Image (cartoon, helix red, strand yellow):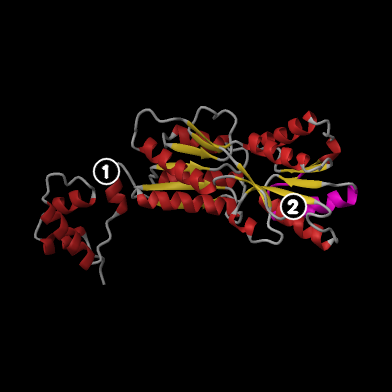
Amino acid sequence: MRKVTINDVAKVAGVSKATVSMVFNKKDINISDETRQRILKVAKELNYIPNSIARSLATNKSYSIGIILPDITNPFFSEMARAIEDEANKLGYNVILCNTDNKMKKEEEYVKLLISKLIDGIIFISGGESKKSLKLIKENNVPFVLVDRYIDGFEENYGVYCKNYEGVVEGVEYLIKNDKKRIIFVNGTSTLEISKQRFKGYKDTMQKYGLYSDDLIFEGDFTLESGKRVTEEIINKINDIDAIFYSNDMMAFGGIKVLLRNGYKIPQDISVMGFDNIQISEFVEPELTTIAQPIYDMGKDACNLLIKLINNEESIEKTHYFTPKLIIRGTT
């Protein structure tokens, strides 16, 4: 059985191929509403699927955007991707999702793939040292928006971020005001700018109260497994712990599992705090106290910003900052 073509639609609708093409390429301003509706009705009845490549060549737009993210298993990124997809669909765009597994080579290959697919724009969440990937995007004049993670050398580009420093300051202040003195900080991958910002928020606040010590600092990589591994290291090295502040929720979940299995009561023995407020945070037991990023709003905003860039709108604010919020639950 052969594929339904634009010629079939034109023949049944009693119009020219050019008229059908103008309707599907949204260049139908001089076509009557009656004719437009007849063409769309026939196309639906025949199950006609427009050729996206031909459409792209005709309109110079694919009506598709790419999302590059580092780890789809982390609910933070899957929640972000859902927000972007929801907003993109409302605006008439499809989404191609690319998961890099924090691997720079894979990230670069995905960038090349998206460019080859005539993608209209890219929402980019870095998995690490992403300068080569971003250079490829810029050199091919593809609009892009950075989300969540800053990249050195690309500060002047469009981006949507959370105020990481301020979020950690609020969390540490809360713990200290609740008589916590020995507060362990489990940082994420130290080369990432968000890790540097979150660590600085912790260090500055602890120093302000005369509580900072290098032996309270540990490093994970934002994964559940690293939270487990680092927490094992913590309880084997340090006895007098008041609280552990994990710089994302996934590491906090791993840490909670290790603490409970080793006989610690949370929060009676050790308070635990995370960062992100992914949806599962309120369903674990005890429920996780965390610094909430407005994940859905950030994804929605990033999508809208990218579409404005694609459409060459004027007076676009380059950098959007969202304010995090402390959510107090059962682990503190």
Residue type at mark 2 is: Gly
Q: Residue at x 42, y 53 (%)?
A: 86
SS class of the residue under badge 1? helix
Q: In the displayed structure, does residue 277 sit left or right of residue 64?
A: right
Image mark count: 2
Sequence-earlier tag: 1 or 2: 1
Label of residue 59 in the image: 1
Q: Residue at x 57, y 38 (%)?
A: 323
Q: Residue at x 35, y 29 (%)?
A: 314
Along the line of sight, the residue nearer the viewer: 260 or 22? 260
Q: Residue furthest bottom?
A: 1
Along the line of sight, the residue nearer the viewer: 33 or 59? 33
The Cα atoms of the two marked residues, 1 and 2, are separated by 49 Å
Magenta span includes 220: yes
Q: What span is colored magenta in the figure? A: 219-239
Label of residue 131 in the image: none
Residue type at mark 1 is: Thr
Image quadrant holding the N terminus, namely bottom left
Magenta span includes 55: no
Label of residue 227 in the image: 2
Whether residue 191 is visible, yes or no, is no
Q: Quadrant of residue 258?
A: bottom right
Looking at the image, is 325 positioned above or below residue 49? above
